[in-house]
């Protein structure tokens, strides 16, 4: 299966390598560099590259390429999913999955990689088990370790691996027992020039933070479960129970995890909480253009739309932009040709507007296409699909936990074509 | 610790200079010598006796390895620490060892004994990790040791160790592929394992070692299907992929009736799926003669059990199920996977990329499936180009008459994109839509013509190429467009586009008679400056014009041909020469001249624009090979459906288990159960109850008596090997082979031969019942001894798992350790005891339910302080007995009961067997409890004979004497007895004693003495038995034990047994 792993940063340095079978020379990465050169930008490096003796499967996360070397047939998604799991684990352990974090913790990284794969086949990928084996570094612990000489290795042998619910540790104790659920919905939409919706759907997740002692058995029910069109579950959820009663019944992992992700069918009408009025035009035979964008709230269920940011990838011919905004600030990156307008909160009384002149390279032809606007926003305390948690029950433990549900709606891939 | 900043500084310094490789040149001085010194520092630190220094050194070494620097010269210093107490140092040493063992084979061998010791550790996690590291050391010399370790671990009690054994199989295989046959045996055994922990790993090993041995799957097929949902996610992927292949060889195509339709792709492309199904009827009528298709229930089982996994959070699992459905499900059911695949499009871009490739392939065959999700494939300007192009591919595949207008409108937006590669791909896509859907051809063509005035040359060029292809379909109507394109030759510079235009004009010069010669004139002017492909087309155009309109173009053509004659490119010179001979009539030019016109202006078929994903589905979807569209190394071909279904009965598992209910619905319930029941089953005991030594395994052994059908099925095995036992027993494989080997060594002694014959002569069912239980302890006493040969001595342990000894080792043993040849067989005999069955509930008292129990003398894995009691229920009533369980145990203080898992139902006439553990606290007091069914409760009690309160211990003669000398005085009980005539032989005596008590024989030098040893189960106090034969059938029986009560009772029991 997975033979070796190389971590490569953006400037092409191989800063970590790990082999699970015989050693594969670093030179195998030359094929990757070749493909990277061909691809112009990092996003377009093909995830699977075939070389004479190996296959390279790579992912790109946080400015790092995780390049794995494969020698025989294996489902590519298997490897890709695993590599993402590795990146997630680093994120989990070090707070970020960056080159510096990995270099600083290279021994822990190595120990993790050793535990996660055996002979190229995944062994322990549950963060719970891993944390039992190798404790994540904290400042306190590193101080204590340097004084006492103890280590980051778990002293006790992990029993989690033996359990048939590998996602939960055996002995968990909290003084405050809490269970929090964040219902986060993202609106993916394409709005066309005229303002009508080409495509819109809601992608939701329920992220949980569960700090409960013992072995609690939770069941979470919704007021309107039929809304959920397509759901994928954390392995802890009992599938049959959902099938028959539409209730999420599970023994939760300890700590933060994603309980479910779901899609609200595109057949349902999706409320679009903002609208955009825009005039972007480039004059023929002159080196300037007009830019005028106004953004306003729409169908926002009486909640304020906040954290609004508009990002525009301007055509290559644009030299710079002279704009004035009635609200928020804007920046234009003349190298990447990206305009970012950070608006903040939209107040319905006075709509934010950004307008001015676009300067083009002299002599360059008029850009063919108007750029599309990518919009980010946030609405607190609202699940735009209308999904509501009905109740959370706990069985198996005596104490009374503190429970909380938070709703939030965000823009996902929200694009306005102009 | 204070030194560490200095070290790291130094390290930082030299790594910025950068260069570990300098360090290997001894001749280099100056700065490089510091590098040497650095390694010396590390060595010093490793040699120190402070763990913290060692740890620091190991961390730095591992950091070196991580950065790809060579640290192999530290090998001797590092390996010394392999037995370090500090767990982190140890682990880092393992990391180092596995990395460099291959390079330093001789030194690596030094560490092996540490792992071999670890393999014997009572802690399952340590056993597992020892096996893991041992098997990762790629040193060919240790192959036999690895093989032995794997075989042993494969029958370990702990499922986790068995899982590690499964992982080790491919490692060993890649080290030495000659071991294949032996490894297959281990795989076969592990495949029969019933725990979810092992399933994924063993199937992975199967796929790597012997994917062609599909016959090994038959017996385990249903079990794998049922376990699937509880296997960890990575294992699920491997199992599903393997089962896909399996199902293709074993079941009939569910789409037989539709297969005819699919042979007509043209039709399938135009018609939507609904139409297809309507078209079914006439086809179906023609197929009436064929046998109506009925899906094999096992095929259905697979589809049903994989479906919930579409909801997995793991993209690889979802994809695996999707491909399973695509390849195996009836057409009508494939649709369910679309939703899940579309969900994956929200994931990371690499996942999108792979999923879209697969969707592209699927959407060609089963377009209807993705149609409802058309809009999910719409393209955003922020998508990476490679994703955009794949989405475009899918959109094009999904286009049909009803949605083409929406799709074209969407395409219009794309054409204006800034991403030019994407625009080019869009134009291609429009071209494909136009060729495939006649209705929109004109619209598309007009749109493309408009693009000809686009400012971007690439766009124009691509449009020209596509228009050329479209025009070939119906040239007559489009002379206007051809004229328009002729004008473009003045401006457009992209060679491919110019070549296309020239070809088009040449091909249809009759439609534009006026313009064509003029174009040729212009082109001949610029001929020398053109690209090669353009030049070739100019020659082509000249030739065609010469043939149709020689008056106007004769001179031009000759001019072009003359230019071409001296071109630098030999292709062009060749072509010019060829064409001149062909078209210009001379005396020499032969018969071909007449046909020149036919040759050049033949009707050419219009090109078919089709997806590059067409026919990729002969590769298993989701595989690497499919993605690359080429066979990857190790790819297993997806076989075609068979014409005749192979015998489905091969999947029947002969020995019924109480857990496996007969009806299918029941079985399903069973599948769900673990998923529900995890709430109660998280703790250790339940897990290990699930392990091989648990109910499943014991059932198999116990049911030997009722397993007549099995006998006939496996008749050949019995013929071959003589005495044998049910193959379903997972722990059996190892013990089976060891038994054979045991008998090899046994044959040296005639005495024991007669013994085994006596054993054989006993009634068949009974011997079967015993086999499982007696085999495993038998070899155990032997095993530690043989380890002494290869490894450091291991302290004797209570029998835990069946051990495996290779034949050669046994032979060695005979020669070396066991000088007394008669010893080996006599050691085997102690456990030749008949399991005495006791009645727990008579069938009259139990109203048809009868319950018997016996002490199977196996260790009870969840709790070593408990005695395992095998309970057998048989239902003699007319109706089902449900919910059989234990309740309200009334126990003497200190006594404990580990209840067996509730039996949900027991069909009339059925028997079931379970195992429960009772801690009797080393007393013979009865354990009282209630046995409940859904309707009744019975008060029952189990009273153990004193001989069952102990477990055999292996010890040497010296140890025995030493222990015995400690247990004198009060602890010694002696009795004189008279042996009967029939009780004179060695064999009988040993048999009698071991039947009376669960003890093992201790080797003894004297002929007239027999020694046995055991430990009480609860407190672990030793019990030593000595039987001394005196003259004239008299004997002295001595029992030494702290537990006087037990000792006394034991003496009574044994003398009774011998007096019978």
Image (tube, coloured by chain):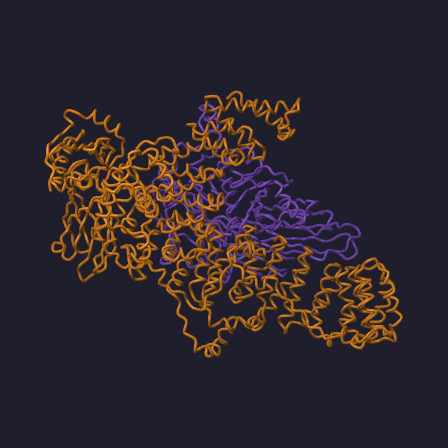
Chain colours: A purple, B orange
Quick one: B997 or A10, which is closer to the camera? B997
Quick one: B196 or A252, which is closer to the camera? B196
Q: In the rendered image, is residue A90 in sight?
A: yes
Q: In the rendered image, is residue A402 in sight?
A: no
The percent coordinates of residue B273 (x first, y second) are 51, 70
The percent coordinates of residue A107 (x first, y second) are 51, 33
The percent coordinates of residue B50 (x first, y second) are 46, 22
Q: Is residue B917 left or right of residue A156?
A: left
Where is B515 relative to B960, above or below? below
Question: Quarter holding the C terminus of chain B?
Answer: top left
Q: How many labels does the image show?
A: 0
Quick one: B87 or B479, which is closer to the camera? B87
Q: Residue at x 58, y 35 (%)?
A: B68
The percent coordinates of residue B609 (x first, y second) are 65, 67
Where is A394 relative to B706, above or below? above
Quadrant in which residue A246 is drawn: bottom left
Q: In this view, does B692 lie to the left or right of B920?
A: right
Where is A149 relative to B342, above or below? above
């Amino acid at each position: 299966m997975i033979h070796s792993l190389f971590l490569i940063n953006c400037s092409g340095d191989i800063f970590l390598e790990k082999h699970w079978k015989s050693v594969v020379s670093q030179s195998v990465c030359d094929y990757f560099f070749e493909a990277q050169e061909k691809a112009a930008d990092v996003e377009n490096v093909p995830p699977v590259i075939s070389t004479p003796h190996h296959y390279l499967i790579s992912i790109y996360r946080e400015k790092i390429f995780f390049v794995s070397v494969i020698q025989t047939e294996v489902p590519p998604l298997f490897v890709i999913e695993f590599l993402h799991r590795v990146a997630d684990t680093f994120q989990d352990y070090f707070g970020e999955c960056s080159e510096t974090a990995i270099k600083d913790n290279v021994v822990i990284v190595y120990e993790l990689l050793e535990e996660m794969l055996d002979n190229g086949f995944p062994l322990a990928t549950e963060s719970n088990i891993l944390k039992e084996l190798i404790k994540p570094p904290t400042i306190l612990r590193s101080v204590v370790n340097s004084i006492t000489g103890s280590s980051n290795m778990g002293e006790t042998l992990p029993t989690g691996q033996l359990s048939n619910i590998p996602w939960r540790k055996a002995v968990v104790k909290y003084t405050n027992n809490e269970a929090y659920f964040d219902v986060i919905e993202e609106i993916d939409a394409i709005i066309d020039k005229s303002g009508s919706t080409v495509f819109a759907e809601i992608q939701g997740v329920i992220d949980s933070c569960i700090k409960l002692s013992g072995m609690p058995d939770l069941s979470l029910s919704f007021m309107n479960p039929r809304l959920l069109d397509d759901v994928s579950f954390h392995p802890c959820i009992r599938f049959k129970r959902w099938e028959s009663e539409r209730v999420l019944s599970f023994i939760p992992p300890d700590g933060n995890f994603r309980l479910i992700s779901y899609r609200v069918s595109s057949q349902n009408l999706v409320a679009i909480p903002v609208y955009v009025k825009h005039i972007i035009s480039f004059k023929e035979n002159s080196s300037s253009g007009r830019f005028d964008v106004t953004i306003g709230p729409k169908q926002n269920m009486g909640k304020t739309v906040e954290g609004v940011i508009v990002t525009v990838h301007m055509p290559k011919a644009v030299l710079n932009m002279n704009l004035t905004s009635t609200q928020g600030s804007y920046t234009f990156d003349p190298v990447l040709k990206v305009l970012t307008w950070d608006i903040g909160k939209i107040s319905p009384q006075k709509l934010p507007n950004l307008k001015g002149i676009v300067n083009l390279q002299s002599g360059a032809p008029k850009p063919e296409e108007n750029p599309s606007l990518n919009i980010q926003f946030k609405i607190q305390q609202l699940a735009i699909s209308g999904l509501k948690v009905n109740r959370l029950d706990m069985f198996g433990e005596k104490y009374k936990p503190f429970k909380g549900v938070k709703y939030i709606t965000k823009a996902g891939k929200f694009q306005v074509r102009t | 610790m204070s030194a560490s900043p200095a070290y790291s500084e130094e390290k930082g310094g030299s790594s910025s200079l950068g260069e570990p490789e300098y360090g290997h040149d001894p001749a280099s001085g100056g700065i490089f010598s510091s590098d040497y010194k650095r390694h010396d520092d590390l060595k010093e630190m490793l040699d120190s006796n402070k763990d913290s220094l060692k740890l620091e050194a190991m961390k730095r070494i591992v950091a070196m390895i991580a950065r790809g620097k060579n640290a192999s010269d530290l090998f001797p210093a590092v390996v010394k620490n392999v037995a370090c107490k500090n767990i982190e140092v140890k682990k880092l040493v393992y990391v180092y060892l596995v990395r460099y063992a291959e390079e330093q084979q001789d030194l690596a061998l030094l560490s092996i004994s540490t792992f071999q010791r670890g393999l014997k550790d009572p802690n399952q996690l340590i056993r597992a990790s020892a096996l893991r590291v041992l098997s990762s050391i790629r040193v060919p010399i240790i192959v036999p040791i690895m093989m032995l370790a794997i075989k042993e671990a494969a029958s370990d009690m702990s499922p986790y160790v068995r899982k590690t054994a499964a992982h080790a199989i491919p490692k060993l295989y890649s080290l030495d592929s000659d071991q294949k046959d032996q490894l297959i045996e281990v795989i076969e055994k592990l495949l029969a394992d019933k725990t979810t922990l092992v399933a994924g790993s063993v199937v992975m090993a199967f796929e790597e070692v012997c994917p062609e041995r599909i016959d090994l799957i038959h017996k385990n097929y249903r079990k794998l299907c049922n376990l699937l949902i509880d296997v960890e996610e990575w294992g699920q992927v491997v199992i599903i992929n393997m089962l896909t292949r399996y199902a293709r060889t074993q079941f009939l195509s569910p789409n037989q009736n539709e297969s005819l339709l699919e042979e007509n792709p043209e039709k399938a492309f135009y018609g939507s799926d609904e139409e297809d199904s309507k078209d079914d009827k006439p086809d179906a009528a023609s197929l009436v003669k064929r046998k109506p298709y009925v899906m094999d229930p096992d095929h259905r089982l697979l589809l049903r059990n994989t479906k919930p996994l579409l909801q997995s959070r793991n993209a690889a699992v979802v994809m695996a199920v999707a491909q399973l459905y695509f390849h195996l499900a009836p057409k009508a059911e494939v649709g369910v996977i679309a939703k899940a695949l579309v969900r994956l499009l929200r994931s990371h871009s690499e996942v999108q990329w792979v999923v879209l490739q697969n969707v592209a392939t699927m959407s060609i065959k089963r377009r209807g499936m993705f149609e409802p999700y058309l809009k999910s494939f719409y393209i955003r300007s922020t998508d990476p180009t490679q994703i955009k192009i794949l989405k475009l591919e899918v959109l094009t595949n999904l286009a049909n008459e009803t949605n083409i207008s929406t799709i074209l409108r969407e395409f219009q937006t794309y054409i204006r994109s800034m991403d030019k590669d994407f625009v080019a791909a869009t134009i291609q896509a429009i071209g494909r839509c136009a060729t495939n859907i006649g209705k929109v051809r004109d619209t598309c063509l007009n749109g493309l013509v408009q693009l000809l005035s686009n400012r971007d040359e690439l766009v124009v060029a691509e449009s020209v190429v596509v228009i050329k292809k479209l025009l070939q379909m119906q040239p007559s109507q489009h002379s206007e467009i051809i004229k328009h394109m002729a004008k473009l030759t003045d401006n457009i510079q992209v060679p491919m586009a110019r070549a296309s235009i020239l070809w088009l004009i040449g091909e249809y010069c009759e439609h534009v008679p006026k313009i064509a010669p003029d174009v040729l004139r212009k082109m001949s002017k610029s001929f020398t400056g053109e690209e090669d492909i353009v030049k070739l087309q100019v020659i082509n155009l000249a030739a065609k014009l010469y043939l149709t309109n020689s008056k106007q173009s004769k001179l031009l053509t000759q001019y072009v041909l003359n230019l071409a004659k001296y071109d630098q490119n030999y292709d062009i010179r060749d072509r010019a020469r060829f064409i001149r001979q062909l078209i210009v009539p001379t005396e020499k030019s032969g018969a071909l001249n007449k046909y020149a016109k036919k040759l050049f202006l033949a009707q050419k078929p219009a090109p078919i624009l089709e997806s590059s994903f067409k026919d990729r589905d002969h590769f298993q979807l989701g595989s690497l090979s499919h993605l690359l569209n080429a066979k990857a190394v190790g790819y297993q071909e997806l076989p075609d459906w068979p014409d005749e279904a192979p015998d489905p009965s091969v999947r029947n598992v002969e020995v019924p288990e109480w857990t496996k209910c007969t009806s299918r619905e029941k079985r399903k319930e069973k599948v769900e159960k673990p998923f529900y029941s995890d709430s109660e089953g998280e703790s250790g005991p339940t897990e290990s109850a699930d392990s091989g030594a648990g109910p499943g395994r014991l059932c198999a052994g116990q049911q030997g008596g009722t397993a007549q059908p099995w006998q006939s099925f496996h008749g050949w095995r019995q013929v071959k090997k003589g005495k044998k036992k049910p193959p379903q027993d997972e722990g059996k494989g190892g013990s089976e082979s060891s038994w054979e080997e045991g008998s090899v060594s046994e044959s040296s002694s005639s005495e024991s031969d007669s013994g085994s014959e006596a054993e054989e002569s006993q009634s068949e069912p009974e011997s079967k019942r015993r086999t499982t239980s007696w085999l495993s302890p038998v070899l155990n006493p032997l095993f530690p001894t043989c380890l002494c040969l290869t490894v450091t001595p291991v302290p004797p342990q209570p029998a835990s798992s069946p051990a495996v000894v290779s034949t050669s080792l046994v032979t060695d043993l005979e020669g070396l350790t066991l000088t007394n040849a008669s010893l080996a067989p006599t050691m085997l005999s102690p456990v030749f005891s008949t399991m005495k069955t006791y009645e727990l509930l008579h069938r009259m008292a139990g109203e048809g339910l009868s319950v018997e129990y016996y002490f199977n003398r196996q260790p009870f894995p969840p709790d070593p302080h408990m005695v395992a009691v095998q309970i057998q229920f048989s239902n003699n009533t007319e109706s089902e007995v449900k919910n059989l369980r234990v309740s309200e145990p009334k126990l003497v203080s200190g006594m404990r009961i580990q209840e067996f898992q509730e039996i949900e139902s027991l069909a009339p006439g059925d028997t079931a067997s379970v195992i429960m553990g009772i801690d009797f606290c080393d007393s013979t007091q009865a354990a009282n409890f209630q046995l409940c069914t859904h309707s009744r409760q019975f008060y029952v009690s189990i009273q153990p004979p004193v001989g069952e309160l102990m477990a055999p211990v292996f010890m040497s003669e010296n140890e025995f004497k030493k222990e015995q000398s400690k247990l004198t005085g009060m602890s010694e009980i002696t009795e004189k007895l008279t042996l009967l005539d029939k009780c004179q032989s060695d064999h009988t005596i040993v048999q009698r004693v071991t039947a009376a008590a669960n003890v093992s024989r201790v080797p003894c030098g004297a002929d007239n003495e027999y020694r046995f040893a055991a430990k009480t189960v609860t407190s672990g106090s030793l019990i030593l038995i000595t039987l001394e034969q005196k003259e004239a059938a008299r004997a002295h029986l001595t029992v030494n034990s702290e537990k006087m009560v037990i000792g006394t009772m034991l003496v009574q029991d044994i003398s009774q047994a011998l007096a019978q």
